[in-house]
Image (cartoon, rainbow, N blue to C red):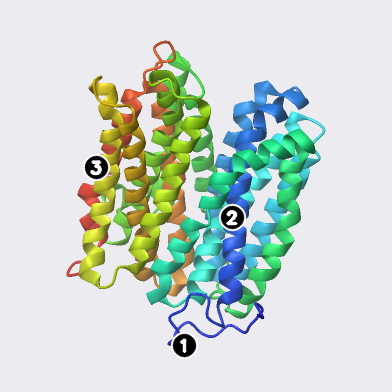
Amino acid sequence: MNLADPVTPATATPDDRLFAPGRRAACVGAVALISMLAFESIAVATAMPAVAEALGGLSLYALAFGATLATSVIGMTIAGQLCDKRGAYRASLLGLAAFLAGLLLAGLAPSMTALVLGRALQGLGTGVLGVALYVGVGQVVPAPLHPKLFAMFAGAWVLPGLVGPALASGLVHWLGWRWVFLAVAAAVPVAAALMLPSLRRGGGGTGATLHWGGLRWAALASGGALLLHGASQREGVGAGLLFAVGTLAAWLAARQLLPAGTLTAARGLPSVVLLRGFIAAAFASAEAFLPLLLTQHFGWSLTQAGIALSTGAVTWSIGSAIQARVQGDAARRRLLPSGFALAALGLAVVMAPVLVAVLPAWLALLGWAGVGLGIGLSFPMLSVLLLKLSPPQSQGANTSSLQLSDALVSSAALGLAGLLFDPVTRQVLPVLVMACALAAAAAVFSPRALPRGA
């Protein structure tokens, strides 16, 4: 089977197979790259305690994660410009180079400071790649196949989510923590060789002049995200102050970087961008505190809590596969709010055994499976709607906005979760209530994501 087949224009083929000739290489390369990014994220989170101990850098532990988030915001903004004006191929080159350089710097780091710098480069690369992948492969694959495409993207996270922690632990034990980064670095050229040729033949951008005035707002957004991340790591008055300043910075930047009307849920594209932030934040904040609920409140082991998280990843993939098979605009129109509502209901079920002590603890597992299924039904549809509502010359900027909304609202939600969580009582119920409210708000506002008459 020849993966390096020529790219056929997206409108020129009636073939309804996602891996048909003309787009096979791009799809295989995209799956490989997303799986690699997913493994890196999960594996680094697993290995970071060993990394910080080996380098004597526990004081920089939180910054090793916060720096990645902050620079990814800048990467997303850069990628939006590059994709629209120079094409997804050039943006992907930049993203891959930054990501690979970051992996090598982190893997060979002589100190925790050097590792944090490597993580910052990784964040820049992943921010660029996240946008370039959506735009580049979305242009190669015909619009009717976009539901299948984004379901495939979601599925690419499942295997790393299931085996990533165990594999990372094995690498740390047998080869040392450096190989968590270096093993991923070794896989980057393979994924690039599969994907880049198709993106290069798929065409470029408009060729218009690049304007970097928006980078100052991206820097402000990055700083806001970093402050919000810092708020989630602190307690007391200091956490509240960081949260307030970070939220203000993120809000000011969002007004400039996101489509007009996003913050007021204007119909169409602005609401699509806002909903992405709501549902991503609901999932991120609930997922961060679910293991604590299961281990501290219900007395589950870490292994059992890990299985619960994996269950959500599996049902997310199932939900994505279901939405890809739904035919007809009317059915898909009903599916979007249904997915958000199911996620909100799932979070309510997670909380039920806490609120009503006689209810069995396994209901929390059932609820989390429902959360994953609901987000799987709705999350990919937002990506489909975004590309559908975006003219080709604006797909990069709008995809950048979608992912910026994800990062900024999730950062704000995690910062607020840090304020709501009481480390003395270890009560996580307020955090879950917040997450449920975000998912419910997404369900309420979801009809506004559809154009009038759709």
Residue 13's disc is: 1
Q: Is residue 211 visible?
A: no
Q: Quadrant of the C terminus?
A: bottom left
- Above or below for 241 versus 38: above
For marks 1 and 2 on the same chain, the one whose residue lies earlier in the sequence: 1
| Circles 2 and 3: CB atoms closer than 8 Å | no
Q: Amino acid at mark 3?
A: Ala
The picture places residue 384, in percent across and down from the top left corner, at 38, 65
Could you tell me which residue is drawn at 43 percent across and 29 percent down?
289
Q: Amino acid at mark 1?
A: Thr
The residue carrying mark 2 is 35
Give the SS element for disc 1: loop
| Circles 1 and 2: CB atoms closer than 8 Å | no
- The quadrant in which residue 191 appears is bottom right
For marks 2 and 3 on the same chain, the one whose residue lies earlier in the sequence: 2
In three-dimensional space, the C-alpha distance between marks 1 and 2, rounded to whole angstroms, equals 28 Å
Viewer-nearest of labels 2 and 3? 2
- Is residue 346 shown left or right of residue 40? left
Estimate how packed mark 3 is, as few (under 14), some (14 to 19) or many (20 or more) residues with alpha carbons within 10 Å: many
Q: Nearer the viewer, residue 321 or 266?
A: 321
- Above or below for 13 versus 383: below
Q: Amino acid at mark 2?
A: Ser
Give the SS element for disc 3: helix
The residue carrying mark 3 is 440
Could you tell me which residue is drawn at 70 percent across and 50 percent down?
184
The picture places residue 312, in percent across and down from the top left corner, at 41, 44
In three-dimensional space, the C-alpha distance between marks 3 and 1, rounded to whole angstroms, equals 40 Å
Q: Nearer the viewer, residue 111 or 74?
A: 111
Give the SS element for disc 2: helix
